[in-house]
Image (cartoon, helix red, strand yellow):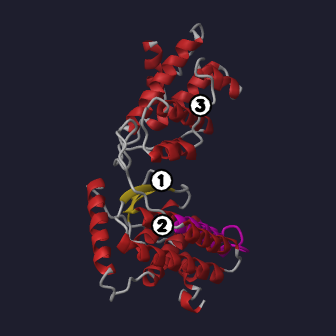
Amino acid sequence: MDTLRDAILRAATNRRAPLPRTGGLDAADVDGAARDVLDRMLVGLWEHGWLPVDVVEAVRRAAEPRAESVVVDAVARTLAGYRSLHPAWVEQAAAVDAVVWWDPAQPYLPQWAARHIEVLDEAVAVVVAALAALIPLPALPEIVPPPGSPLADVTHHHVDPKVLKRVRGLLAKAESTAFPEEAEALSAKAQELVTRHALERMPTEVATTASRRVWLDKRYFDGKAQIVHVVAEANRCRAVVYDLGFVALVGEELDLEIVELLSASLLVQATRAMVAAGDGARKGDESRSLAYRKSFLLSYAHRVGERLKAANEPPTDDDRLLPVLAERKRAVDQLFTTLFTRTVSKSTPIRSEAGWQAGRAAANRADLDVRRS
């Protein structure tokens, strides 16, 4: 057992090391060794700030789909061993479909192999691939109490269901329309609605400052991350971009929910506008180049950020609201500096002037004065 564990770890940390062979070994022993190494790895990540969605997203980017499958199962298996879980862990496990589908009374790995029509050696190779993706992961700030922590009563603030329904309706229309001007006007209406909703609730609710992570597609990551960043700033949140593939957000819970909702829609709209800008272009034209599309998204984000910020300026004559806004900002800044002790500014070069101008035009077409809509 110890020798097989060592062989699995060697293969995961050294690509030149041979993959473990299971011939002549009892299936239960092979399963025990593979599960032990993988589960210990996950428990270590839980203790260093990682959450189920984070782990699955990281493996999805670095390994094949089968490796993601064994990691999702390991998430279900490890979390099942804790007596207490913060609700966020339950939500995250559900988000990645982590359920115990196998018979726990029988060795897991042979059941996984049968389900995927693989031999046991190949199943071990998949575990090795999963470990190879997990081992290099750095520690992350703890944003949710780890599994097994004592549960404390926490008041969660969410967008009112009626407001949420209206906002989702506006954003769905924005995503489905073929007219950029209409899409931006609808998005602006959604932003105005949630801003008014948040400001109206502020004086009567105790702030609950928290942090969330938004994972993004690898393609054109810098531009997409910048879109999330500007939406966060426009909604009283702060953001840090991780090259791992996500944006970390800090803000009041209600504002974080708004940021996730609006940025998801704007990402759809920005991507569609970017692709449309190259419609009809011939192969090799600049509008279909990587530099053009990256510049397009960065410019789109920059201009959308300007317009959202202008649309979200809080009233300057509300004596009841201004102290609340100031206190919320202090709370967000304090949590931000606690979680992220060292951050660096990063600039992204613009390599296509045409892409920059097209992106700005796409974000600038609509009249965002929604009072006239």
- Whichever of labels 3 and 2 marks the residue nearer the N terminus, that label is 3
Tag 1 and tag 3, C-beta contact below 8 Å:
no
**104 in relation to 240, above or below:** above
Q: Position of residue 223 (x, y in %)?
A: 50, 66
Residue density around tag 2, few if under 14, some if 14–19, many if 20 or more, within 10 Å: many
- Whichever of labels 1 and 2 marks the residue nearer the N terminus, that label is 1
Please tell me which residue lies in front, 269 or 349: 269
What amino acid type is highlighted by mark number 2? Val
Tag 3 and tag 2, C-beta contact below 8 Å:
no
Span shown in magenta: 261-289
In percent of the image, x 66 and y 68: which residue is there?
Answer: 284
Mark-to-mark CA distance, 1 and 2: 17 Å
Residue at disc 3, secondary structure: loop
Q: Quadrant of residue 320?
A: bottom left
In percent of the image, x 53 and y 42: which residue is there?
Answer: 93
Mark seen at residue 115: none
Indicate whether residue 253 is drawn in magenta.
no
Is residue 349 something one can see in this rendering?
Answer: no
- Whichever of labels 1 and 3 marks the residue nearer the N terminus, that label is 3
Q: Which residue is mark 3?
A: 100
Residue at disc 1, secondary structure: loop
Please tell me which residue lies in front, 138 or 337: 337
Q: Which residue is mark 2?
A: 259
- In this image, 330 relative to 94: left or right? left
Q: Which residue is mark 1?
A: 245
Mark-to-mark CA distance, 1 and 3: 28 Å
